[in-house]
Amino acid sequence: MSIDRRLLFAVALLSAASLLEVRGHGRLIDPVARSSAWRYGFKAPHNYNDNELFCGGVGIQYGVNNGLCGVCGDDYSLPRPRPNELGGYYGKGFIVKTYRQGDIIKAVVQITASHLGHFEFHICPLDYFDEESEACFRPLRLANGKRKFMGPIEQKGDYEVELELPWYMTCKHCVLRWTYVAGNNWETHVQETYRGCADVAILRDDEDDI
């Protein structure tokens, strides 16, 4: 696709998005994501738009970046580290929650405007990777064995999701990522995508807390 056609496509997508009556917004609050940590007592930079980590928006994600998204919800075209990635403005790397290997844990997502769709969760063990990347993130299963939380996500509010941590994985520094793929654009596969990354640790059963 030529640059001119890509720009026209981006403008069309942005125009379509502006006509939607329902705008989806949300944030990961347990474990708390980097952009939201300040809301829960952590000394962290304030992001008052922490419920809008949507890959730059539909027009940017699909019209400019060919559907790609920064690993933690930023516009993919931004230079790395992007604002919500480790080393970026919000990515300070302090651990907000500690778990044990193989635990069933509770993740909480706060939806401030429902957008239908589904949630997915991934874990990146930074102890074994030089940086956050899609190669590092491994899918997490829900406690019921499924890979996606289908809700239904029809109202704003807090959604609790039980996740199963891998029995074989431990890390002094892992990144737990929430992804929200919206579902209110009925006539197209182009959907808004939201993400949030939280810094956590996963310890052995016999290991002392950090």
Image (cartoon, grey):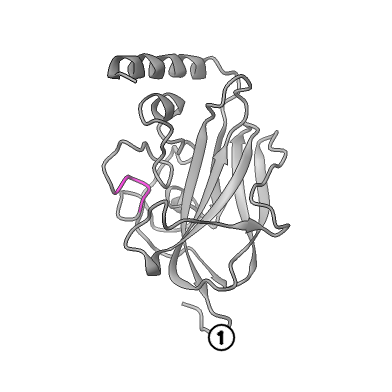
Residues shaded magenta: 81-85
Q: Residue at x 51, y 83 (%)?
A: 208
Based on the displayed image, in which of its 4 quarters is residue 188 positioned? Answer: top right
Q: Residue at x 41, y 55 (%)?
A: 135
Q: Point out residue 86 in the picture as x, y percentages from the top left corner.
A: 34, 55
Chief SS of the magenta region: loop
Residue furthest bottom in the image: 206
Left or right of 170 in this view: 184: right
Q: Residue at x 36, y 64 (%)?
A: 129
Q: Nearer the viewer, residue 40 or 126?
A: 126
Q: Nearer the viewer, residue 19 or 35?
A: 19
Q: Residue at x 68, y 37 (%)?
A: 153
Q: Residues within 10 Å of mark 1 (few under 14, many from 20)?
A: few
* 84 is within the stretch colored magenta: yes
Left or right of 34 in this view: 140: right
Q: Quadrant of the N terminus?
A: top left
Compared with residue 22, is residue 50 higher up or lower down, i.e. above or below? below
The amino acid pointed to by label 1 is: Asp
Q: Dot 1: what SS?
A: loop
